[in-house]
Amino acid sequence: MDAPRTIDLKKDKGLTLEWADGVTSYFTIAFLRKMSPSADMRQLREEMATNPLAILPAGLASGPISATSAELVGNYALRIRFSDGHDTGIYSWAYLRELDAQRRDAEPPAGP
């Protein structure tokens, strides 16, 4: 998967990626934190899917979250550091495209 043509991170709002095929993806910071590909967040998402009483980590439950920084990981990913201290998720370009496709599939079709 090729890297995006442009990467625009607004630390308190979201991440915009423009891909070589012309598709633009936008993710809020809160969504990116929730969907972190880190092992602990994958486990939490699985637990929350089966147990509605699962307890969120303090940073996710305590209010607004922002990105404090981001860095490229080779030519294949982006690591984002969040205001709650989470920084173990590496967002590969393939994972971000997959998240965008899932989000688009979940949106209701635009109607008149």
Image: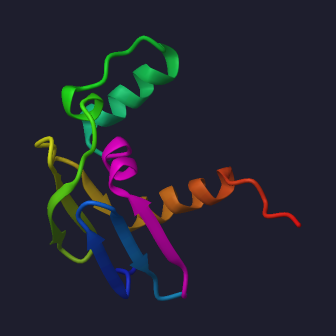
Q: Residue at x 35, y 48 (%)?
A: 30
Left or right of 67, for residue 53: right
Q: For this rendering, which residue is in front, 8 or 5?
A: 8
Magenta-colored span: 22-36
Q: Residue at x 19, y 60 (%)?
A: 79
Left or right of 13, for residue 80: left
Placement of 21 over or under 105, stated as above or below: below
Placement of 20 over or under 47, stated as above or below: below
By what rule are the colours in the image chosen? Answer: rainbow
Q: Residue at x 35, y 35 (%)?
A: 42
Residue 73 percent coordinates (x, y): 17, 69
State yes or no: residue 102 in magenta.
no
Left or right of 1, for residue 103: right
Q: Residue at x 20, y 26 (%)?
A: 58
Residue 100 percent coordinates (x, y): 52, 61
Placement of 90 over or under 16, stated as above or below: above
> In the rendered image, which quarter contains the C terminus?
bottom right
Q: Quadrant of residue 43?
A: top left
The furthest residue to the right = 112
> In the rendered image, which quarter contains the N terminus?
bottom left
